[in-house]
Amino acid sequence: MSRSLLAAAVALVLPTMAAAETLTLYTSQPNEDAQTTVDAFMAANPGITVEWVRDGTTKLMARLAAEIEAGAPQADVLLIADTVTLEGLAQEGRLAAYKSPEDAAYDAALYSADGYYHSTKLITTGIVYNTGAPAVPTSWADLAKPEMAGLVAMPSPLYSGAALIHLATLTGTEGLGWEYYTALAANGTLAEGGNGGTFKAVASGEKPYGVLVDYMAIRAKAEGSPVEFVFPAEGVSYVTEPVAILAGTQHMDAAEKFVDFLLSEAGQDLVVQMGYIPARTGVASPEGFPARDDIKLMSFDPAKALAESEANKARFAEIFGVQ
């Protein structure tokens, strides 16, 4: 090959090589959801490869903390369970601020005002009941009524992150507060384990009523389980699987593209296909779920929940007599 032809070939190859980059994602999504998300993003952004690590949020944060301590964080982007965890990282200066143009299509309560994290879906907590139950609850207050004594199960905030956020939300709500949790405890409410145990107790009829994340009940109902899900009149608490960019990433442009994709209509359509409520306004919910605009979200402050987390756990443990 002549020098001129070789130079021309190199000139064609170099831009492609320069454009290609690898983004590392740490996520708590289920494996199938994570692969679907990554595949869709890479199809829309052929110059970017995404390598991902999946684990529970607590384990991922422990891994990231160890990497930071060693001076070698590996993640560029985080896609994990809740805003409280990311609020903690933001306060430590571990997250990069990015105000996505897609934020305009979201309720301001669903993203950091400074751009440190952005919600990608809604996983709400409401009431599940067995279809053989004697009454249909319509509000959180119903679960604390005397006639509900010994009939209610719920996940423990000492075990479940979603339950801890639920606790922070309800105890900060006028008309409920800590008095509500005191009434639940006095009523013999079973509070242990995670959402899976609560669902099994209600589906089997062991406990006619429970506090549960929406998709677990709604999907099970569609598959024939004898359960119904209620969005209580006061509203619902929620976790949002937010996305964030790690400070110091060497791939800021690619990371911003990843955030924009998740928040875009195409990214939110993926959320619906996975069977979750989209966080973006104007995107239709999956079959069996109410419309996004019909769901009343209770007020929630991630910074306040973070600051009060340990105190909330201790007070819950005292009220319910658990360790």
Image: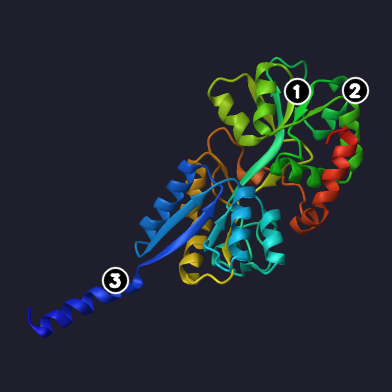
Quarter of the picture containing the C terminus is top right
One can see residue 81 in this view: no
One can see residue 186 in this view: yes
Identify which residue is drawn at 65% across, 20% down: 203
- In the drawing, what numbered circle is on residue 16? 3
Within 10 Å of disc 2 (Cα), the crowding (few <14, some 14-19, many 20+) is: few
Identify which residue is drawn at 62% across, 57% down: 106
Question: Relative to 136, does residue 2 appear above or below in the rendering?
Answer: below
Mark 3: secondary structure: helix
First along the sequence among labels 1 and 2: 1
The image quarter containing residue 107 is bottom right
The kind of residue on which mark 3 rests is Thr
* Colour scheme in use: rainbow
Identify which residue is drawn at 56% across, 57% down: 78
The kind of residue on which mark 2 rests is Pro
Residue indicated by mark 2: 146
Identify which residue is drawn at 35% across, 71% down: 19
* Mark 2–mark 3 distance (CA, rounded to whole Å): 69 Å
Nearest to viewer (mark 1 / mark 3) = 3
The image quarter containing residue 134 is top right
First along the sequence among labels 1 and 3: 3
Residue indicated by mark 1: 136
Q: Residue 113: percent from the left, percent from the top?
A: 69, 66
The kind of residue on which mark 1 rests is Val
Q: Residue 36: percent from the left, percent from the top?
A: 43, 46
Quarter of the picture containing the N terminus is bottom left
- Decide if residue 94 is on the left or right side of residue 42: right
Mark 1: secondary structure: loop
